[in-house]
Image: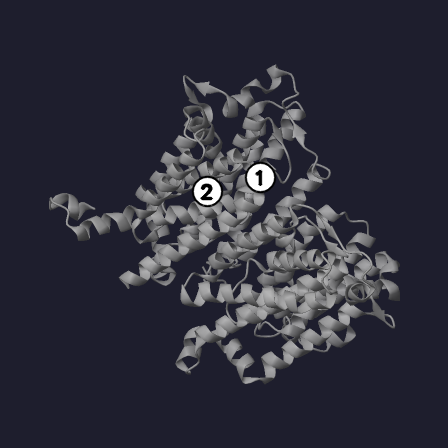
């Protein structure tokens, strides 16, 4: 605080706006953590990393499509589908390691379907992905017949979701690798940068000679592949697949993570690193709230508030009306 | 349609025009006829009245979400608002409050959520998908906390005298016509008037067409855009009250599945009109179609898997058709 005082008030305000998200996150967690010191235990922090990993993966998949200027209502539904598929196939006796490419392929197909609907049939991405969301949900229920699928006796496969190397959860390592690859792809390759350009301002990108439709389609496919893989990891993490339809809950958390992540940057640019930090923040927050004795029912409401607040930080300066442009 | 009516003998081209304009309605009727062939219980008067009666709730909610969508917004919180207001009304009745107070408070709750939505989306500029998705979860959380973890509020076990007036909304009838249909009809007429004949409706159309132009022609775009959210939440609250009064109990999160049906109804409804504009009449037709579809799935005892598969395919097909029609013109 003493350091802050040497700045003028305007500077302090600037700093708050620029670093506001990060400071806010740390302060919130500190307060909650001080009220329940258990939160800061090393094993608990590692648990947070583990709990947040699936969510962060979904958020990464969603970030990929948001960067390309699309939107995906069906992100959570796709994760559920591949989760159920992989659990079912493993129970049916498939080699568990083969489910990983299976998830990616199913995801790619779904992504390609979304891309087809959005770029060729020209359906706005909100509606198109809403349609595919229902289709995916239907397929999931069709496949699991409304029953939970439980995997037992698959030590190697379960290691992906539940194992640890040293004290670091394996799944967190996977997420970090995926995030690092994505970061490199989006920031240091021509294709990735063009996807950014497409999402930021399609007209300008088109004028610069970028085939925007192609890059939008690519971002749908990339996102699909990541989400498909996430589903398989989830089935490893929860030892199977639950029959409860939680696609929407996944979606809201992932969206929160992506948009909260974008508030890290001055220009509100979506980024993989920001998404990872925010995803983990959301997991940490849920964890800290539960330790503080807040019930599960209220947590989803709090997440809803966070979603609104994080996007508010983005848009408050522009103050347009919230029409849906992707619609 | 007007041209062909004026110039007498319809040529092949004109028949095609009529077909492409009313194709979606013809298609819907064709689907219903096929259903009737598959299962002849489908078109019995008793079944039809039943479907009409239960569709009224979907119609009101679909019209609600359509009002928002017609200005390029979206309201994902409609189902949750309906849910919560139903629960609130039921809880107040259980606590022994008079029926008018229960209805009033539930409606006020809808208004309040609508007001928050209005501020968020219209005055602060939160994109509607995200803002209303957030509100959906906030309202759900509120409702779950209120009912202590989704405990159903059961009204039909209360002494008949205490709930007579409240149940009249959903179960009574004026002469031969069920009360629900009367209420629904009144709402449809009012909303049609608002959308097509009122100043607000005109302004909504302007905002839908081009916000910039609307702003420059001195329309208060924030007010118009925000008003649709208030309207939609209020209508959803009414739908929630109707549902609870009809079924006699309020199960928290029980209305959530309506949200998907609303989307299907609105998008199919969009096909009914020239240029795929969202209108009240179109939405009502769409909602009725969805009502009959659900009924058919129930009659055939097909599970939720078929229902959501079908919903998804119908949405994609409806919007793809619209997109193709537009492309042909342009």
Q: How far separated are the C-alphas under marks 2 and 1?
A: 13 Å
Percent coordinates x, y for residue B147 in the rendering:
70, 36
Q: Report the side of B9 relative to A110 (left or right).
A: left
Pointer 2: what residue?
B62
Give the residue at x 70% y 69%: A277
Q: Mark 2 falls within which chain?
A: B
Above or below: residue B157 compared with residue A150: above
Percent coordinates x, y for residue A121 in the rendering:
40, 63
Give the residue at x 53% y 44%: B307
- Per the image, label 2 sits on a secondary structure element best described as helix
Percent coordinates x, y for residue A100 in the rendering:
68, 68
Location of the C terminus of chain B by quadrant is: bottom left
Q: Report the side of B24 relative to B128 (left or right).
A: left
- Per the image, label 1 sits on a secondary structure element best described as loop
The front one of B308 and A129 is: B308
Q: Mark 1 falls within which chain?
A: B
Above or below: residue A319 compared with residue B313: below
- Residue at the farthest top position: B161
Q: Could you say which quadrant of the image residue B131 lies in?
A: bottom right
Q: Report the side of A124 relative to B143 (left or right).
A: left
- Residue at the farthest front position: A93
Discs 2 and 1 lie in a common subunit = yes
Pointer 1: what residue?
B255
């Amino acid at each position: 605080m003493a350091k802050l005082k040497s700045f003028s008030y305007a500077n302090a305000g600037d700093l708050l706006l620029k670093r506001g998200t990060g400071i806010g996150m740390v302060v919130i967690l500190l307060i909650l953590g001080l009220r329940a010191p258990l939160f800061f235990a090393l094993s608990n922090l590692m648990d947070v990393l583990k709990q947040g990993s699936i969510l962060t993966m979904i958020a990464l998949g969603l970030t990929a499509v948001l960067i390309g200027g699309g939107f995906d209502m069906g992100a959570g539904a796709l994760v559920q589908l591949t989760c159920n598929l992989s659990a079912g196939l493993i129970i049916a006796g498939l080699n568990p390691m083969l489910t990983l490419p299976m998830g990616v392929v199913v995801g790619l197909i779904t992504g390609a379907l979304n891309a087809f609907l959005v770029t060729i049939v020209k359906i706005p991405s909100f509606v198109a992905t809403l349609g595919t969301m229902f289709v995916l949900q239907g397929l999931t229920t069709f496949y699991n017949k409304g029953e939970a699928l439980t995997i037992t006796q698959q030590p190697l496969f379960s290691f992906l979701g539940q194992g640890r190397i040293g004290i670091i959860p394996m799944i967190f390592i996977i997420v970090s690798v995926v995030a690092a690859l994505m970061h490199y792809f989006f920031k240091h390759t021509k294709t990735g940068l063009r996807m950014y350009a497409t999402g930021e301002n399609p007209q300008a990108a088109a004028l610069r000679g970028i085939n925007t439709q192609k890059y939008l389609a690519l971002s749908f496919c990339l996102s699909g592949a990541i989400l498909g893989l996430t589903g398989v990891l989830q089935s490893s993490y929860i030892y199977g697949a639950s029959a409860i339809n939680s696609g929407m809950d996944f979606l809201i958390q992932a969206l929160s993570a992506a948009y909260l992540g974008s508030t890290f940057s001055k220009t509100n640019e979506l980024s993989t690193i920001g998404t990872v930090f925010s995803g983990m923040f959301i997991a940490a927050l849920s964890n800290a709230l539960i330790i503080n004795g807040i019930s599960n029912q209220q947590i989803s409401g709090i997440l809803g508030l966070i979603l609104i607040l994080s996007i508010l930080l983005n848009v408050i300066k522009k103050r347009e009306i919230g029409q849906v442009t992707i619609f | 349609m007007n041209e062909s009516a004026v110039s007498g003998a319809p040529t092949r081209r004109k028949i095609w025009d009529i077909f492409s304009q009313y194709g979606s309605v013809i298609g819907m009727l064709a689907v219903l006829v096929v259903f009737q062939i598959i299962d002849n219980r489908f078109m019995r008067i008793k079944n039809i009245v039943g479907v009409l009666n239960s569709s009224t709730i979907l119609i009101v909610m679909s019209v609600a979400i359509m009002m928002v969508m017609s200005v390029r917004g979206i309201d994902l919180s409609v189902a949750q608002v309906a849910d919560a207001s139903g629960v609130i009304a039921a809880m107040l009745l259980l606590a022994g409050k008079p029926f008018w107070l229960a209805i009033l408070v539930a409606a006020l709750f809808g208004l309040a959520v609508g007001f928050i939505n209005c501020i968020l989306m219209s005055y602060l500029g939160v994109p509607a998908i995200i803002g209303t998705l957030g509100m959906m979860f906030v309202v759900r959380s509120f409702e779950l906390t209120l009912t202590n973890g989704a405990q159903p509020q059961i009204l039909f076990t209360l002494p008949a005298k205490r709930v007579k007036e409240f149940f009249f909304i959903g179960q009574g009838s004026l002469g031969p016509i069920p009360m629900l249909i009367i209420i629904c009809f009144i709402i449809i007429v009012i909303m049609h008037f608002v959308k097509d004949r009122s100043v607000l409706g005109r302004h909504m159309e302007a905002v839908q067409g081009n916000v910039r132009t609307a702003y420059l022609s001195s329309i208060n775009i924030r007010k118009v855009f925000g008003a649709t959210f208030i309207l939609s939440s209020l209508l959803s609250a009414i739908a929630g009250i109707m549902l609870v009064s009809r079924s006699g109990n309020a199960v928290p999160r029980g209305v959530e599945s309506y949200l998907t049906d609303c989307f299907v109804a609105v998008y199919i409804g969009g096909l009914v009109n020239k240029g795929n504009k969202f209108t009240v009449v179109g939405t009502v037709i769409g909602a009725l179609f969805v009502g009959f579809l659900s009924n058919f799935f129930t009659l055939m005892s097909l599970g939720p898997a078929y229902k959501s598969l079908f919903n998804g395919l119908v949405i994609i097909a409806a919007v793809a058709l619209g997109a193709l029609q537009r492309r042909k013109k342009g």
